[in-house]
Image (cartoon, rainbow, N blue to C red):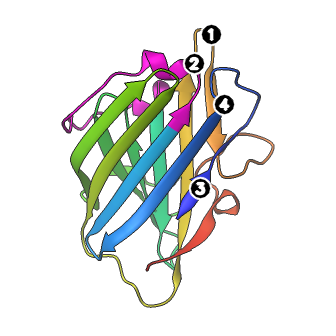
Amino acid sequence: MRIDLVPFLPCLAVEALRYTLAYESSTTLRLTVQLKGSIASELEDVTQVGQREFGLWQHNCFELFLGEPGSAAYWELNLAPNGNWNCFGFNDYRQNQKESDRCAVTEFSAVCRGLDYQLEAQILTKPPLRSSGSALSLGAAAIIETANDLNYFSIRHGTTPDFHHRDHHIPWKLQ
């Protein structure tokens, strides 16, 4: 599934930001992030998975939110351009945030060429995602740090940049 993210406020450092999320198996997802813009030159080339780290959203961070049908619970994956990552589980909207083993990043690479940046990550999910024909709730977001600001990108926005709110997510059928 391809998802073009839009900024909450105009961000001159980013011309385009796209996620491609692929369901490879019930336990494996592949995320590709493509960013075009002057900020790309500030992101580093990386060839391996980093470490788990808290607070990645305070700088450049790419995020996914997945919730299963019929449940208010969801999990959030944070990926930093340097390969660091973290996963959090929530019982409901922003409730009971805890580091989670629901997913892990098992492969990571990032390459910058001029104004083009591309990140690829393989994500292991446990337990396996259920492909029961029902759609998952999918949120995709990014925080891009420029000299003076944090810039927020998402599928859609409300009156504030709130990536956790399911009104800003889309359905995703596993295929």
Please state the extent of the stretch shown in magenta in the rendering: 35-60
- Horizontal and vertical percent for residue 129? 34, 76
Does the residue at mark 4 contact the one at mark 2 (Cβ under 8 Å)?
Answer: no
Question: Which quarter of the rendered picture does the C terminus lie within?
Answer: bottom left
Q: Which residue is mark 2?
A: 38
Q: Which mark is residue 3?
A: 3
The answer to whether residue 100 is visible is: no
138 sits left or right of 12 in the view: left
Q: Is residue 57 above or below residue 39?
A: below
Q: Which residue is mark 1?
A: 148
Q: N-terminal of the two: label 3 or label 1? A: 3
Amino acid at the residue labelled 1: Asn
* Most distant residue in the right direction: 159
Q: Is residue 71 above or below residue 125?
A: below
Q: Spatial distance from mark 4 to mark 1, Cα to Cα?
A: 18 Å
Q: Which mark is residue 126?
A: none
Q: Is residue 26 above or below residue 162?
A: below
Q: Spatial distance from mark 3 to mark 2, Cα to Cα?
A: 21 Å
**51 in magenta:** yes
Does the residue at mark 4 contact the one at mark 1 (Cβ under 8 Å)?
Answer: no
Q: Tell which tag, 3 or 2, sits nearer the viewer.
A: 2
Q: Which residue is mark 4?
A: 15
